[in-house]
Amino acid sequence: MKYLKIMTPVVFLLMVNCTAQNISKNFDTIAYKAQTRGSLIQITVEDDKLNYKTNQEEGTKEISKEELEEFKKVIGGLNLERIGDLTAPSEKRITDGALHAEFTIKIGDKEYKSITFDAGNPPTELKKLEDLLYSISKIKE
């Protein structure tokens, strides 16, 4: 009986912890927007579709299960609560030397917005995500 009293809470805590970790890796939407005067790039990942829009073209691409897992892995490695507090490594966007870019990641009812950064030169923590979006969408930066 003592054994059950000790093991039941331990097993319960492990189950809750594992469930919380899985929730943090799944996402509803990843939105990337980069713009400046006269230029626009929008990339959105939702379900198994990637939608993109630029000044020249727009379209939708199917995302493979492997690519979707890669997105989940990259998102799972981010501290989403802090992406709005990161520091941009450069400031070219201030003088229109680069597009103003930002990420919005939606998980459940919660939205996580990144700081604004130069497109093509995000904070180190967001680099993998930006590279993955551009490689799958085939949009040139």
Image (cartoon, rainbow, N blue to C red):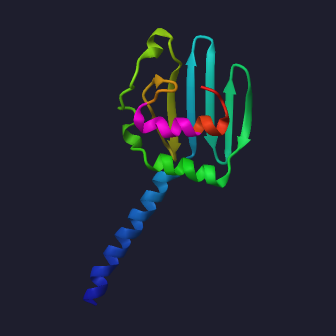
Q: Which of these two is toward me, 67 or 102?
A: 67
Occupied quadrant, residue 117: top left
The C terminus: image quadrant: top right
Q: Which of these two is toward me, 115 or 1?
A: 115
Q: Which of these two is toward me, 25 or 109?
A: 25
In the depicted structure, whether residue 101 falls above or below residue 46 = above
Q: Is residue 2 magenta?
A: no
Q: Residue at x 38, y 41 (%)?
A: 81
x, y percent for residue 125: 41, 38
The N terminus: image quadrant: bottom left
x, y percent for residue 99: 53, 19
Number of on-image labels: 0
Q: Residue at x 51, y 32 (%)?
A: 103
Q: Which residues are magenta?
A: 123-132
Residue that lies at the very extreme toward the bottom in this rendered image: 1
In the shown orientation, is residue 69 left or right of residue 89?
A: right
Q: Which of these two is toward me, 137 or 29?
A: 137
